[in-house]
Image (cartoon, rainbow, N blue to C red):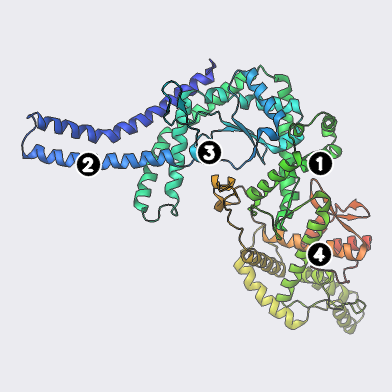
Amino acid sequence: MGSEVGAQAARARALAVLRIRGRALAVALLPAAAAVILVAGGTSGHLVGPGWDAARAVVSAVALVVLLAAGVIALVVARARPAVSPTVPIAEDAAPDLYRLVRDLAERLDVPAPSAIALTPDCDSWLEDRTHPAHGPPAREERDELAGAPGGRHRRTAAPVLVIGSPFLWWMRVGELRAVLAPVVAGTGPSAHPDIAAARRFVRGLDAAVATAADRGRCPAFRPACAGIGWVARLLLRSCRQHAAEMERGVAAAAAERAQAVDYGVRIVAQEQVGLAYAGWDRLLTRVALPAWRMGRWPARLDAGVVAALTELSRRDRLAEGFASRLGERPACDLLEEPGTVDEAASLLAARLFHGGPAECGPDWAPVDWSEYPEEVVDRKWRTDAARLHRVLDALGVRRAPDPTAHDPNGPTLTRVLDHLTAPDRDDQEHSDAGATAASPAATSDADTDAKPPSRDPATLDAEAEADADTDADLHPDEDTPRAPRTAALAARLSAELAREDAAAPPAPAPGASPSGQAGPDALWDVDALPLFPLQPPRTERELLTDHVTAMVCCAAMDTAGAQPGLDWLDGPTLLVGGERATDLAPRVLSLVEDGDPDPLRVWLSDLGIRPEKPVRLV
């Protein structure tokens, strides 16, 4: 470990953590020491008598119980498997240039090189200790060359694993990646110090012991013992929490200070790319990948999609014009032998972490290429949502709007949706306006009859009004709930229908062992907790209704006006009308859903030649 101020502070905090461990050991040995004193006093003839004999028996029994409990806790702390970040391991033969870059960087920093490299589907990089026996194959047997006998088994002292964010490899250039990794690789120096390594092992063991004790499935018959182990581990964790946090801050400060001499100027520019890559990755996951995951498809080239998304951003934003010129330099993904294979593995892992998809491909979970995304994802998503919307309307008893000139007069139409979501007070206002301009009561009656939508007879209106009033009272509408009663009822039924479909979906198959008999990568982290990092909270009822109405409008546009489904790298599924994105649809749909005003949407449909009365094709 170097002479950096942060390294010295980290070592001091590590010693504080080890002192807490020593105090815990002393407390466990204290009853045994008292028992030894009492036994020694009795054998020497100094502590004799019935009272001393009873004290020796009681203290010896307590010492035996405490030693047994301490031994069990120490065994659990030592053997519990620490948590491991889900990653895609990169073998050296799959990326020799990348390993060479990292080793050269470690040599320039005068620190040990990382033992391995792995990728994570996130915009971050760090060092991860995986020296626990559960994280890899057993340590090879060492032999004493002088004595010719096998040596004792020692804890592996391999350097930590370097985890790199996969978007960095595709968006950053080689020089930028080297500059970004310099502070991370420099952290292997302080990590190799025995005191810091021992303190980290102790803290990670306590954390793993807490998780082991909290898992009821691992010890169903020993819940009291597990509760006691968890209580002791949490107590020790609270005692050393502050020291462990300060130790890690010291290690980070020492690594940053050591890395200042390596590519410092380039690192300043590269940090801008880190923020840009994070923004593009977040936008790609939430707007592009998430709709595909919900449809049972996972994009197999997410990292390549980051480049396309950020290139599109540079085209739209004049502030980002300089970023496009970087694409002429050598990308860091060229350091991989097979970038496509690595990208596919990272994309599948991202789908598992952020959505909870299965570990293997199947009929309901298949990869999709970007060129197939509009047809495989966008078109299917819109038609599936439109079909669900009409099923809910059927369940609510909403009459269809027939088109006598169509091949299927009773087919699903956009007019049915527009008529149902139109606010009743707007109809009343239209009727009163018509009556005010009429010449006689008969004309007023005729105007009211003509203005009434075909799907709204008095009996249906009365039944819907009663049901909607009860539903609206139960929903406690807020800013995320549509204001119109019938709109709120439709949104609530859509939410319930979607929840039923999710509950009826078959669960993801449990991962098994690999063909070689070794535990697969899923064995190192809890697959029952998937998704580990949900991208978005559950959609509100208003958002669900807006998405379904938008899908119905897009289906009508595709079937009656020749529009096409498309992919926008920044906004996800998009409607292409005449080869151009329809960017003005969203506010018109919101006007219908939130205010019950269909006029802006009807004008938009008329301008583009979309016929809402024509039936559309559903899945």
Labelled disc at residue 120: none
| Among numbered discs 2 and 3, the one appearing first in the sequence | 2
Label 2 sits on a secondary structure element that is helix
The residue wearing badge 4 is 552
Left or right, 64 with reference to 579: left
| Among numbered discs 4 and 3, the one appearing first in the sequence | 3
Q: Is residue 332 above or below residue 428?
A: above
Judged by depth in the image, the label closer to the viewer, 4 or 3, is 3
Residue type, mark 4 in image? Met
Mark 3 → mark 1, Cα distance in angstroms: 39 Å
Residue type, mark 3 in image? Pro
Mark 1 surroundings within 10 Å by alpha-carbon count, few (fewer than 14), some (14 through 19), many (20 or more)? some
Judged by depth in the image, the label closer to the viewer, 2 or 3, is 3
The residue wearing badge 1 is 308
Q: In which quarter of the image is the C terminus?
A: bottom right
Label 4 sits on a secondary structure element that is helix
Judged by depth in the image, the label closer to the viewer, 1 or 4, is 1
The residue wearing badge 2 is 62
The residue wearing badge 3 is 137
> Residue at the location (47% across, 32% down)?
141
Left or right, 103 with reference to 579: left
| Among numbered discs 2 and 1, the one appearing first in the sequence | 2
